[in-house]
Image (spheres, rainbow, N blue to C red):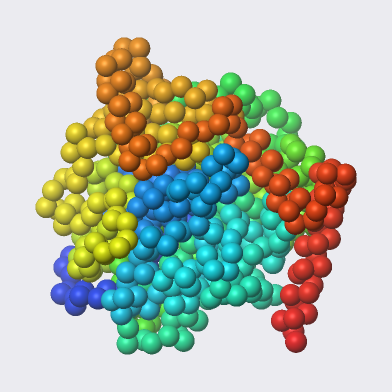
Amino acid sequence: MHLKSIFLVVALLLCPATTQAQDASSPNIVMILVDDSALMDFGVYGGEAQTPNIDTLAARGAMFTQYRTSPLCSPTRAMLITGLDNHKTGIATIPEVLPAEQVGKPGYSMALEPSVLTIADRLRDKGYRTLMSGKWHMGEEANEMPQNHGFDRSFALAASGADNWEDKSYIPYYADAPWFEDGVEASLPEDFYSSKFIVDKMVSYLEKTDSSKPFLAYLPFQAIHIPVQAPAEFTAKYKGRFDEGWHVLRAKRHKRAQELGLVPKGAPLAPMPDDAREWDDLNSETRALYAARMEVNAGMLDAMDHHIGRFVSYLKDKDQYENTIFVITSDNGPEPNRGDHDRRLGLWMKLNGYNIDLDKIGEKGSWGFIGTEWALAAASPGSLYKFYATEGGIRAPLIMAGPGIEPSRIHSPAMVTDVTPTLMDMIGLDPAVQGYIPMTGRSLLPVLNGEIQSVYSDDDIRAIEVSGNSALYKGDYKILRSILPVGDGKWRLFNLAKDPGETHDLSAKEPEKLQEMLAHYDDYAAEMGVLDMPESYDSTKQIGKNAVKRMRARHGKIIVLIGFLGLVGVLSLVGIVRRKRRKAEAEV
């Protein structure tokens, strides 16, 4: 059966023919954010992993096909919960790649700024319980955590990521895993697994807060950010699924994207980059290892969906499900970074009890990743991946379900900044609050209601910029700039209606259109306060520089003498001592 037909049949089976009237004056809101999930990773979008709980919510709600985020996690998170362009929030990029020239500049504070309201701020004033558990990454100090941005209760990871099994860092940039509960440094339980814990903590907050009030539950999961880790029983379900390699997966996703209407029939797929490895050129042991890494990736997504299902069951048991609006999305495209071609990182892993071998892959002590080629395949039918404003980097899934939302597939353009304005509109909140920056996003409620086809006309622009990687949309057209280490910093022009894979640059053929779009981008950059990148800026090199600066600040001038190789050993010991100290304090 045709995949599009299958989707429609499933939707009919999962959705009742009629819906009962509900009191949606103060519906609960659940915002689920997946980390580094590609457009097609969810089952309902054509992915290989089993995500029945996400798929069920999609079948009873709206599934967006033209939704865009930013290419990096923190800017997306800031835009998602504020409705503001990332440069207006203070989180124009992530601190790991911030150049010295931008430190402390307006829009580049790397924490939510005082003039910014979050959805939690707004809902708490309306009488909501506001709760959060998971990855925050919008500030690193205690006073920058969620409790100072509208959340009544929160268990938040300040870093870009952390181990999913243990209370420890995942890269040398961080000395440990900075978890905070309500702004106070916190430790993790012995039986910790991130997806399970995030749901358990949210349930505990709901149990301990006033049940007479509606709630906002923000659940930003660690899945499927590196280190990619999953319980063995979930990983085992995908044994052999990826043995054909990344070229085959990429082609299959491209085909399914056409069948599901995510791209037009016959839409071209961008070729793999010249430096991408050929699957058949790898020896059998390497192929087996890389196939297993994708099995863990699917298992991690599956495990997250399982725990989402537990949370949904809890809401049903409490008679809260029917009056809850669900938002499910991803912060950006798939992660391309590898963990097997940097000897410094390799040494750090060994000193911190990590391995990248096949043995017990995905389990405790395994530092998992999918790497560049699998990321290219996962991003299909888009080009490139996380870090870049290409379609593979910023085109993401978005599902909205709940009272007042009919089952539908929505092809209207939508941006991450539109989510909070839409939710405000759905519960009747005035988005304007005197003394605070007005939201730059638009409410999608008229589209959800079926009143109009799109809240964006062909003359409206939508733009995004993160650390020099930039995109601007107008009608069917898009201009794109990708910088080092993958791009060359040149602007290119594409017609996405015909070429969603960004395969054919129209700059030479349509120079006037390019200039028109560039003028729009200049206006956007001026309005939002976008800063130019330093000459020859390279995000990969910058994160190395920033890591050394942080290490020097933590450990003094000795860093200069012992060098990075020695440093990772020192940092490992420091991390171990800190974990043991926190554990001892917790036991007391």
| Residue furthest left in the image | 451
Residue 339 placement: quadrant: top right
| Residue furthest top in the image | 508
Q: Can residue 566 be seen in this view?
A: yes
Q: Could you tell me which residue is drawn at 81 percent across and 68 percent down? A: 577
| Residue 133: percent from left, percent from top | 50, 69
Q: How many marks?
A: 0
Residue 353 placement: quadrant: bottom right
Residue 565 placement: quadrant: top right
Residue 518 horizontal side relative to residue 100, left or right: left
- Depicted 166 relative to depicted 334: above or below: below
| Residue 159: percent from left, percent from top | 60, 58
- Depicted 341 relative to depicted 20: above or below: above
Residue 43 horizontal side relative to residue 558, left or right: left
User: Of 562 and 304, which appears nearest the observer?
Assistant: 562
| Residue 393: percent from left, percent from top | 46, 39
Q: Could you tell me which residue is drawn at 56 percent across and 73 percent down? A: 183
- Depicted 95 relative to depicted 82: above or below: above
Placement of the C terminus among the 4 image quadrants: bottom right
Residue 83 horizontal side relative to residue 285, left or right: left
User: Of 474 and 93, which appears nearest the observer?
Assistant: 93
User: Of 137 and 10, which appears nearest the observer?
Assistant: 137
User: Of 492 and 61, which appears nearest the observer?
Assistant: 492
| Residue 476: percent from left, percent from top | 26, 30
- Depicted 566 relative to depicted 468: above or below: below
Placement of the N terminus among the 4 image quadrants: top left
Q: Could you tell me which residue is drawn at 29 percent across and 31 percent down? A: 520
Q: Is residue 298 visible?
A: no
